[in-house]
Image (cartoon, grey):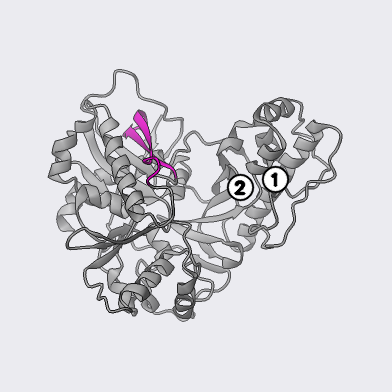
Amino acid sequence: MVLALDLSVDPLSHRHRHPARRGSAGLRKAQIRSAKPSSRITMLSWQQNPGRASDDGAAGTPLYLGIDFGTSGARCALIDGRGAIHSEGKRAYAPGVARQVGDAAGWASSWKEALFQLIGDIPPAHRPSISSIAIDGTSATTLIVDSKTGELLAGPFLYNESFPEALPAVASIAPPNHTVCSASSTLCKLVSWWNTTCGGGGSGEDAVLMHQSDWLLWLLHGKYGVSDYNNALKVGFDPEADAYPSWLTSQPYARLLPSVRAPGAPIAAVKDDVCSQYGLAKECVVCTGTTDSIAAFLAAGTTEPGRAVTSLGSTLAIKLVSKVRVDDARFGVYSHRLDDTWLVGGASNVGGAVLRRLFTDDQLVALSRDIDPAAASPLDYYPLLKNGERFPVNDPDMAPRLEPRPESDVEYLHGILESIARVEAKGYNLLRELGATAVEEVFTAGGGAQNEKWTAIRERVLGVPVRKAEQTEAAYGAALLALKGADRRHDIARI
């Protein structure tokens, strides 16, 4: 296996910058723009399954640690420069502590505990060889921290917490249909806190906004106010202009915004006390992170325009590498920057949750054996659990359509699998209609990737090659970010 790298990184400025003036006022509903970033870190790709390292390890071989913080627990992956896995681990969050929205102390302490437990779980022989660390977290999970004391001033506000009272204020300054115009956006969380705290007489002078991964990385490197452009998207950062927009920087709470760099950019060396306690090398570098969904995409190892990843879990989500940026709030479509390209995504409410309601796992396996994937099913369903669809059709009142049910369960399953494949195809077609690069190849993640008959059906319906992604764990994608930043240790002296 050969891992292709380009580590020629020009770090993003860590000071706030205003974008150049533009003739167009704001975002259109379907916003399409060419990617012209001023700096980049080329993503990693490989030609074969990177696999697992041999049992004898690799003493002295540089290793790269990625840690994923999901909704219920954390995972880690330790890889070498060829992408081979040397160690993996997982930790659930503390039981009974971090389970309820608003339990700020519980969530934060559980994350911190899981972080250091995972580092402690790594075999001691491997720890001195760790060259760099990167962490991903859930998008729009937000904390407000005192930059002088490290005290948690507010939050964590979780990714799915909504602050509708802040939405009118945000909508009044942001361009129409901007991704921040959602009650659960990072900006709405910041504005809500600002209006409640500083509007009531507080100054917020030493406060700084941190995303989940920013805060966890800070526990390792000790520097405040550093983020990445994937996490910062939902607070209003413009990844194309490589700056916060003027409509945001003109606000009084703009001083809380973190500096923004490319994912995988080096921040600082691991703090001395952490190195001493866990046996890490003093040269070990902490790098900027990303969101969990982006890390999972990176794990699949496909970053060329036209390549995509479909996640077939409880619902169906697609992410496509595009040469142009596409944003359309009507369908929940928006783009993350991916070096010199864009990662355009959308999510449907159809998916495996419907299958689980209708069939057991054993039935799904047994019935799938008798499906002929080369034959198109005449059944036309829209497999929803309840009313409402968001992508590729925006219809909050759309009703599930799972009738008529044939006498044969094989035919019924065939019809449902093919109908979900049609929704997937409509999703990729919609992205193309909005201006994104046409899909050329699809990698599959999630439980649905295990069903070979479904894969064959989807390949026929989509009209492009479809195959299972070799790696799908977000922790593996975070490790790839750590690998990207490892050779730029000298940059931290300039930061």
Residue position for label 1: 420
Q: Residue at x 22, y 32 (%)?
A: 127
Where is residue 47? Give x, y as percent. 46, 34
Q: Which comes sooner in the sequence, label 1 or label 2?
A: 2
453 relative to 261, above or below: above
Where is residue 410? Give x, y as percent. 79, 31
Secondary structure under the numbered disc 2 in the rendered image: strand
Tell whether label 2 touches label 1 (CB within 8 Å). Answer: yes
Where is residue 390? Give x, y as percent. 63, 59
58 relative to 7, above or below: above
Closer to us: 170 or 317: 170
Q: Is residue 40 left or right of residue 472?
A: left
Q: Quadrant of residue 117?
A: top left
For the record, the magenta segment spans 72-97
Secondary structure under the numbered disc 1 in the rendered image: helix
Q: Is residue 374 magenta?
A: no
Q: Quadrant of residue 331?
A: bottom right
- Quarter of the rendering occupied by the C terminus: bottom left
Q: Residue at x 51, y 74 (%)?
A: 27
Report the amino acid beneath label 2. Leu
Closer to us: 376 or 448: 448
Where is residue 237? Give x, y as percent. 38, 67
Residue 230 shows in this picture: no
Residue position for label 2: 316
Query: Residue extending furthest front?
Result: 96
- Quarter of the rendering occupied by the N terminus: top left
